[in-house]
Amino acid sequence: MPNRYKIHQKLISIGDDFWIENQEGQKVFKVDGKVFRIRKTLVFEDANGKTLCSIKERLLTIKDTMVIADAKGGQMAVIKKALLTPLRDRWDVKVNGGPDLDVQGNFLDHEYAIKDGRNKVAEISKKWISITDTYGVDIEDGQNDILILAVAIAIDMMMHDDDEKKEKKENKEKRK
C-alpha cells in the first residue's frame, strides 16, 4: 500500500512554513521557507526539527530549474521543465545515484504522475482530498518519500512562479 501525504498548496511561498501530513492527519514533515536569501529556498525537517533536505532555485538558467540537496548539501536531484511539451506538461528529474524520473500530467489541477521509466512511483492528485487548495501525494513502497515530496513541492513552486510571471505580464499590458 502506498504512503499517502497531504500538502496545502496555497501555503507554498517563500517565507511561509507549512506541514506535510500523513494519511492519519499527523504532521510528519515541516517545510521551512527561508527568507533573506537571493534565491528561493525551502528546508525539509522531520517532526523534531532535524534537516532532511532542501530545495533551491537555480539562478540564471534557460529553463526553470530547482535543485534538491540532502541534509549535508550534496545534490540529490535536479528538476527541469521540459522545453517541448506537445500535449501535457512535463518535467525531467535527474537523480544522483538512482534512476531518473519523468513527471507528466496536469500540474495546474494537481493531477500528475511521477515515473521511473514505465513504473509509476508516485501520483499527485486532488481527487481524494475534499479540502480546497490541498492535494495528495501517493508514494509507492520502496521509494524515497522525502525526494518525491520535494519534487512535488518544487514543481508546485515553479508552476506558481509561471502563474505570477503571466499575471505581471498581463497587468503590464493592461496599463499600456
Image (spheres, rainbow, N blue to C red):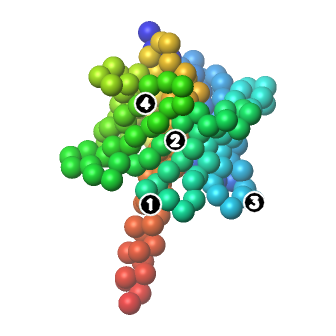
Circle on res. 78: 2
Q: Secondary structure at mark 3?
A: loop
Question: Viewer-proximal residue, 42 or 69?
Answer: 69
Marks 4 and 2, how far apart at CA: 10 Å
Spot occupied by residue 70 in the image (x, y as percentages of width and height): 67, 33
Marks 1 and 3, how far apart at CA: 24 Å
Q: Quadrant of the C terminus?
A: bottom left
N-term-proximal mark, 3 vs 4: 3
Residue at the bottom extreme? 176
N-term-proximal mark, 2 vs 1: 1
Marks 2 and 3, how far apart at CA: 23 Å
Spot occupied by residue 109 in the image (x, y as percentages of width and height): 35, 43
Residue drawn 29% across the image and 22% down it: 118
Amino acid marked by disc 2:
Val
Q: Quadrant of the N terminus?
A: top left
Q: Secondary structure at mark 1?
A: loop
N-term-proximal mark, 4 vs 2: 2
Residue at the front extreme? 97
For disc 4, the marked residue is 100
> In which quarter of the view is residue 100 placed?
top left
Marks 3 and 4, how far apart at CA: 32 Å
Task: Tell me if residue 31 comes above or below residue 85 in the rendering.
Answer: above
Question: Viewer-proximal residue, 58 or 166?
Answer: 58
Q: Is residue 145 left or right of residue 86?
A: right
N-term-proximal mark, 1 vs 3: 3
Amino acid marked by disc 3:
Phe
Circle on res. 62: 1
Amino acid marked by disc 1:
Ile
For disc 3, the marked residue is 36
N-term-proximal mark, 4 vs 1: 1
- The local crowd at label 3, few if under 14, some if 14 to 19, many if 20 or more residues have their Cα within 10 Å, is few
Residue drawn 44% across the image and 16% down it: 140
